[in-house]
Image: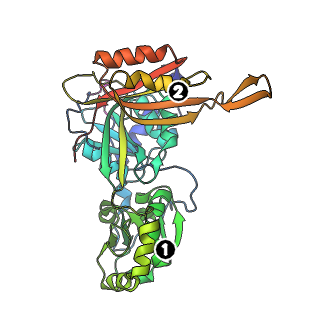
Amino acid sequence: MNSLMAFKVNITISSLDSSYKRTGLVLNSKRDVVSCVLGGKQAAITPVEDDGHLLSSAQSVELSGIQRNMNVLPRPLTSKDLSPSSDGCSNVRVAYKGAPGAFSEAAALKAYPLCETVPCEEFEAAFKAVELWVVNKAVLPIESSVGGSVHRNYDLLLRHRLHIVGEVQMVVQHCLLGLPGVRMEELKRVISHPQALAQCKISLNKLAVVKESVDDTAGAAQLVASINLRDTGAIASARAAEIYGLNILAERIEVPFNNVHSNEDSYFSLSRSIQNATWFANYRSIGQDDSDNNITRFLILSREPVIPRADRPFKTSIVFTLEEGPGILFKALAVFALRGINMTKIESRPQRKRPMRVVDECDSGSAKYFDYLFYIDFEASMAEPRAQNALGHLQELAPFLRVLGCYPIDTAQ
């Protein structure tokens, strides 16, 4: 509650409400928020970082006749748009980072097929939207099989008092998009989120195009359509192509050319020209950047936790710190192994408030070490005595321990 009071209100509820009505998002007038039971429908996601881009989205442009009217799309929320609201909701509203058509929006719709999705400009805005009752849930990426962990969201999990109530695992398939009538060989550059560009690096290198970064994949598609960039392609989802009126020049662009499916005969010709034994051997050795098994895991965040149960597989996420000492991390992890608990994830992040620890060494003076936070996921429900005993044991070793959430494991395909 203190964090809510500290948040500076930049706009009134009435102006926020009118803004949402213009964008198709309506705030209701009751505080009671319908709690949502995940029940097995939550399914499964890509890490994306929200910094370091070269291009910015255009604010006002003339739309051509072949393009969709993008004025009807929801405007992404920023932190300035958020204020404490006494309004409730009759429908589930789910925040995500990016523009409409982003892979995070697809993950939100997979978890809650009938939800109203709310785009946010930054991860921080999505966290605050849940805290301030603007939305019911947030669906945000936490790790990817190709790009690794989303460190920004690990930091925000500790900064905000939200609960993990579910997870969504989703196969991410990238498409190369362009304006109608534009052929692949006409492209001089391709824009997308940095991780999408990295995941499709091999295919893009074969196209010999300039790669430039933007905030998110759907935003790249929106930019190409809104400014009418005929020499520029975007890597985004098939749904983004539909939303912004673009053509799909190639599907599954994260898979190198010899396996990718294209909508253009010229692409097959280009593909055949590079399929030789030497190139294929080189691809076998360096092809880890482009993967046909690109799976992203998303977390579902809520103000209230779900009630742990023992009648179905549950996962628990925690964060803790440890004092310096030989074998201390081994001892901390052993509390799970001793009870037959499977640990599925460990992530370490330096503490920002106390990043360095000074330790006196008798023979060499003082030594400095990073002071770490450890994030761990393990397969057990807090309703099980073994999980309770493991955390009780861990508390004896950890000066700080916090349970981030206990939630059903995503078993959907």
Please report the residue visible at 44 percent of the width from the left and 83 percent of the height from the top.
186
Q: Position of residue 403 (x, y in %)?
A: 42, 23
Q: Quadrant of residue 388?
A: top left
Q: Give the residue at mark 1.
A: 205
Which numbered circle lies on residue 147? none
Q: Is residue 197 visible?
A: yes
Camera-nearest residue between 195 and 319? 319
Please report the residue visible at 33 percent of the width from the left and 24 percent of the height from the top.
305
Pick whichever of labels 1 and 2 is earlier in the sequence: 1
| Mark 1 burial class by Cα count in 10 Å: few <14, some 14-19, many 20+ | few
Camera-nearest residue between 49 and 328? 328
Q: Give the residue at mark 2.
A: 329
Magenta residue span: 28-34
Q: Which dot, 1 or 2, sits closer to the camera?
A: 2
Colour logic:
rainbow
Camera-nearest residue between 158 and 118? 158
Amino acid type for the residue under numbered disc 2: Leu
Q: Is residue 13 left or right of residue 384?
A: right
Q: Is residue 14 visible?
A: no
Q: Position of residue 55 (x, y in %)?
A: 55, 62
Q: Is residue 177 left or right of residue 115?
A: right
Amino acid type for the residue under numbered disc 1: Asn
| Mark 2 burial class by Cα count in 10 Å: few <14, some 14-19, many 20+ | some
Camera-nearest residue between 257 and 62? 257
Q: Is residue 114 left or right of residue 281?
A: left
* Residue 354 vertical position relative to residue 110 in the rendered view, above or below: above
Please report the residue visible at 39 percent of the width from the left and 44 percent of the height from the top.
96
Q: Quadrant of residue 287?
A: bottom left
